[in-house]
Amino acid sequence: DSEKTNPDLSDILSYAQTNNVATAKKYVFENLAKHKLDKVYSEIEEPIIPVVSEMQNYGIKIDKKYLEDLSKKYHKVLSGLEKEIYVLATEEFNIKSPKQLGHILFEVLKLPTAGVKKSAAGGYSTQIDILEKLEEFHPIIKKIIEYRELQKLLSTYIDVIPDMVGSDGRLHAQFFQHGTTTGRFSSNNPNLQNIPIKSELGKNIRGGFVADKGHSFLSFDYSQMELRLAAIFSADETLTEIFQKGEDVHTAVAAHVFKVPMSEVTKEMRRHAKVINFGILYGMGVNALKKNLGGTQKEAAQFYEDYFKQFKRFKGYLDGTIEYAREHGYTETLFGRKRYFRNINSSIPFIKKMAERTAINAPIQGTLADVVKLAMRFIDDRLRKEGLHESVHLILQIHDELIFEVKKEAMDVARKIIREEMEGVFEKSFIHFKT
């Protein structure tokens, strides 16, 4: 059941409709074989159980003094923002209260309410998407967005991480290898996969994570992996050729769509291509494209059409994936991991559309999860084989990225091994391409 993330014993017993663990185990493994998921378990999930356990037990060293100093600095900034918001609001109120904030924005400051949803209690929504739409109408909105970001960084990371550090000076977050519906990891206590890095405020948190004496961090991530997988799944000649040539995928796509040489692709053209490249992987339609690109509905529709004229097999793959999900009720990764969609044939249009969008992305995101897990397995095997297991430690898994703490004298050989194993996943795995 792909919807049952991070199941506990009661979930397993309930699934098998028994109170006996041995009976449940037998039932689960029979179903793994029946649904052809036994290799996903035996080749991907089972081998990395000790790898994940070791990653958690080893942890990551924290500079508590750095985070404590950052906390003092950020709380001062937060206090300053609070005062600025009160001045702009003409009165003091609880900024964290959606109800009170809604009262200030829509009743005191009289900001436009067109398109603003109301809660069950009757108050206006102050969610981030609403605030972003209102930003041009009053300077208080920008301050509130900044306040929320800073408050979240403090309450989720900066103020809590020092108290979570163990007696060894290291943070031991939890990682769940079955924590999402697509097979990706999730993280908790704290969630180290969700530290904001787009803003300078978020990036500064990373300074609190430090390598042990005589060690350095080594970070590896897969480049444009979801788009590469889209090329593999769709066998689209144009998209495949872009990667085979080693071209910047967003620039190359822009050149194809706008029908100009790559040297003439502007920053704006590349931005448009990047939006649609990633948007389509997540089932973005014309309306969402218009919102992300700006411009008119007609322009967005034209851009959408021009894109698929250049990548015809990619379009065929997307349509075929939805049809497959409608017929079978699930989609599969390249390695056979399944995600089920109970609402794919719903009579309620928006529920059906949501299931279709998710079905488009699930095989690609799920395959990336499989690839990263296999990489973790193969890297660990190789490090043990070459006697480097005590010198190279996996400390973090963040989506398509693996971060290691490495003894400085082992740095060069570790870099070579990890890269080779990450690049060689398909060749070493049990997958067999039909091409």
Image (spheres, rainbow, N blue to C red):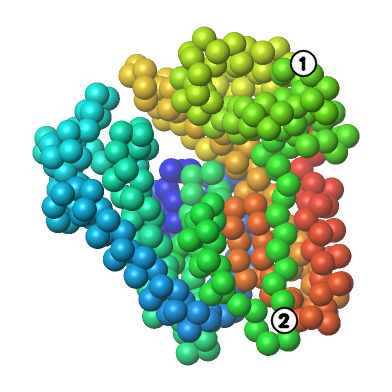
Residue 84: percent from the left, percent from the top? 27, 56
Observer-nearest of 305 and 60: 305
Sequence-first disc among 2 and 1: 2
Count neighbours of disc 1 (C-alpha within 10 A) and say few if under 14, some if 14 to 19, many if 20 or more: few
Residue 170: percent from the left, percent from the top? 53, 82
Residue type, numbered disc 2: His
Q: What residue is at 72 percent from the left and 68 percent from the top? A: 218
Depicted 35 relative to depicted 91: above or below: above
Count neighbours of disc 2 (C-alpha within 10 A) and say few if under 14, some if 14 to 19, many if 20 or more: some
Residue 399: percent from the left, percent from the top? 59, 53
Q: Quadrant of the C terminus?
A: top right
Regarding residue 397, the answer to whether it shows in the image is: yes
Residue type, numbered disc 1: Lys
Observer-nearest of 309 and 109: 109
Observer-nearest of 4 and 284: 284
**Tag 2, which secondary structure?**
strand
User: What separation in Å lies between label 2 and label 1 (alpha carbons)?
Assistant: 49 Å
| Front disc: 2 or 1 | 1
Question: Does the CB distance between marks 2 and 1 fall below 8 Å?
Answer: no
Residue 299: percent from the left, percent from the top? 55, 13
Q: Which residue is mark 2?
A: 215
Depicted 5 relative to depicted 153: above or below: above
Regarding residue 329, the answer to whether it shows in the image is: no
Q: What residue is at 72 percent from the left and 81 percent from the top? A: 215
Q: Quadrant of residue 415?
A: bottom right
Task: Report the disc number at residue 259.
Answer: 1
Depicted 2 relative to depicted 416: above or below: above
Name the side, left or right, on which 195 lies relative to 261.
left
Name the side, left or right, on which 407 lies relative to 283.
right
Observer-nearest of 160 and 138: 138
